[in-house]
Image (cartoon, rainbow, N blue to C red):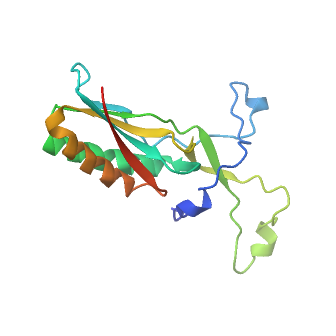
Amino acid sequence: MAKLMRAVAWRRLERPYTRKSKYRKKDFIRGVPTNKIVKYVMGNQKKEYEFRLTLVSDHDIQLRHNGLEAARKTTNKHLERKAPLNYLFKFRIYPHHVLRNNPLAAGAGADRMSTGMSHSFGKAVGIAARVKKGQPVIEVHVPKEKVQVAKEALHRARKKLPCGMRVLVEKN
């Protein structure tokens, strides 16, 4: 399996030239990688909560689906341990943008396989969510006594994402 490229390669918002259509002839992308994010809403959805904590982006950025899944896992695990069935956790973004890479071959015989950069559309290697500055990424609803637990969970999620984020605390 190919090594995962660093987030700096996909960080900048670029023009989305990755058309997906229900008609195969009109597709620019042939085959989109599967989304690694398993769930978008977790916790107790029936209960009303006093506080809402939101993880907000400080930059315009693309967040890859594997980073978002890592943030989801660490946040949900912390909340399950410290506040079992006393929280509501939601993702506020969805990865639609297809990331492409034009792998260049190196080594013996590479000149016969590689076409260089001419018509280098690239192969689909992943998907990302396009996030604007100030846009909420993750939202956690908790009662008053669990605000610190939720804050710690969002700080852990922040470390899994490749940009500056801040946690906003609001009363519902």
Q: Residue at x 82, y 64 (%)?
A: 115
Q: Is residue 16 left or right of residue 84?
A: right
Image spot of residue 20 (x, y percent): 68, 33
Looking at the image, which residue sits at the far front?
171
Q: Residue at x 75, y 39 (%)?
A: 28
Image spot of residue 42 (x, y percent): 29, 32
The quarter of the picture where residue 127 lies is top right
The quarter of the picture where residue 139 lies is top left
Looking at the image, which residue sits at the far right?
118
Seen in the picture, residue 87 relative to 152 is either above or below; the reply is: above
Image spot of residue 164 (x, y percent): 47, 56
Q: Which part of the image, by quadrant, shows the C terminus?
A: top left
Seen in the picture, residue 76 relative to 162 is either above or below; the reply is: above
Q: How many labels, in total?
A: 0
| Front one among 148 and 161 | 148
Looking at the image, which residue sits at the far top?
46
| Front one among 54 and 72 | 54
Q: Residue at x 23, y 18 (%)?
A: 46
Q: Is residue 58 left or right of residue 82?
A: right
Image spot of residue 132 (x, y percent): 57, 43
| Front one among 103 and 74 | 74
The quarter of the picture where residue 11 lies is bottom right
Seen in the picture, residue 65 relative to 40 is either above or below; the reply is: below
Q: Is residue 41 left or right of residue 26?
A: left
